[in-house]
Amino acid sequence: MNTTTSASIDSAPVTHTEGAILSIKDLKVVFSGFKALKGVNLDVGENEIVTIIGPNGAGKSTLLDAIVGKSPVASGHVFYHGKDITNRSAFEVARMGIGRKFQNPNVYNELTVFDNILLALKGSHGVFSSIKSKLTAAKRDKIITVLDRVGLLEKGYSKVSSLSHGQKQWVEIGMVIAQDPSVVLLDEPTAGMTPDETHLTGEIIKTISQNHSVVVIEHDMEFVKQIAQRIVVLHQGEKLTEGSVSEVQSNPKVIEVYLGREQIDAA
Ligand SMILES: Nc1ncnc2c1ncn2[C@@H]1O[C@H](COP(=O)(O)OP(=O)(O)OP(=O)(O)O)[C@@H](O)[C@H]1O
């Protein structure tokens, strides 16, 4: 991979981390004087699952928003495949290959699961023309592959309105991966799910990581343990630490600001 350099505020060259698909350097986001991110660094490798945890208001969603051009970056850099994409528009970032799923499913309830995935495929233009146009074998195969990866092969011809909350979330994950992103960003994908749905979501994330890098914001520590390879802990707009599940769970600072509180909440 070639090294890309960008000028920082003080003109010192800033480069991405060699080999990282997504490389975030000293990222700062400020809302009307409030520092939501105070200089966060994060690297995501190919086919890696990175899980972000931290207390409410830590800056987790803001970090994903800043990556995809939804929150303006005050300073610092977002490199994607070595290219500086800081403050690109949400549309450009999505087109380049960073897919984002938000907390609430954004699906077409009156269409089938199959048609929802069809609409998300690259090259689809508008609901009516996409569904009425002739389905090529390649598109059909692609949709079936996506349905298989998100565990919805048998629900392909069901209307989304008939699905459970968890299944609707998987439809939307399918719509994101149908666009062939290199990186998939998931904001609390298990919110509101049953324990069984939560576990299946973990298995789906592990499956999709075979073809995509995945960054997941999550609160449920059982789920984090199921999927986590590397955990990043955010606190008050800063990275407190990062490491394996056992490293993070035994870190006194993490216990003090986050895990202790989670354990009390769970009691
Ligand atoms: N558009 C905005 N305008 C002003 N303040 C904002 C905006 N978005 C987020 N914030 C503030 O930035 C801080 C970080 O918010 P963020 O949503 O990123 O936290 P979080 O870690 O995702 O929290 P949660 O777990 O509750 O979703 C919070 O104090 C929040 O109130």
Image (cartoon, helix red, strand yellow):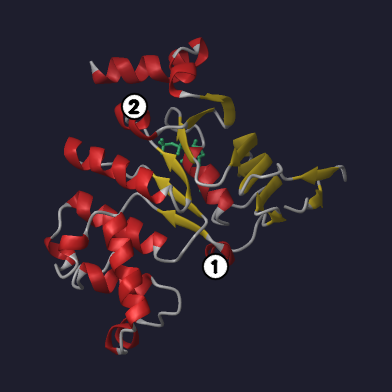
Q: Return the mark for residue 95.
A: 1
Where is the C terminus found, in terms of image quarters? Answer: top left
Furthest-left residue in this view: 162
Q: Residues within 10 Å of mark 2 (few under 14, many from 20)?
A: some
Res 105 visible = no
Q: Residue at x 34, y 84 (%)?
A: 136
Q: Return the mark for residue 112.
A: none
SS for callout 1: helix
Q: Label 1 vs label 2: CA separation?
A: 32 Å
Q: Is 178 left or right of 17, judged from the image as shown?
A: left
Q: Residue at x 32, y 89 (%)?
A: 133
Callout 2, which amino acid? Answer: Met
Q: Return the mark for residue 221.
A: 2
SS for callout 2: helix
In percent of width and height, residue 4 lies at: 78, 53
Which one is in front, 240 or 34? Answer: 240
Q: Residue at x 65, y 57 (%)?
A: 87
Q: Residue at x 50, y 13 (%)?
A: 251
Q: Earlier in the sequence, mark 1 or mark 2?
A: 1
| Mark 1 sits near ligand 1, with its Cβ under 8 Å away | no
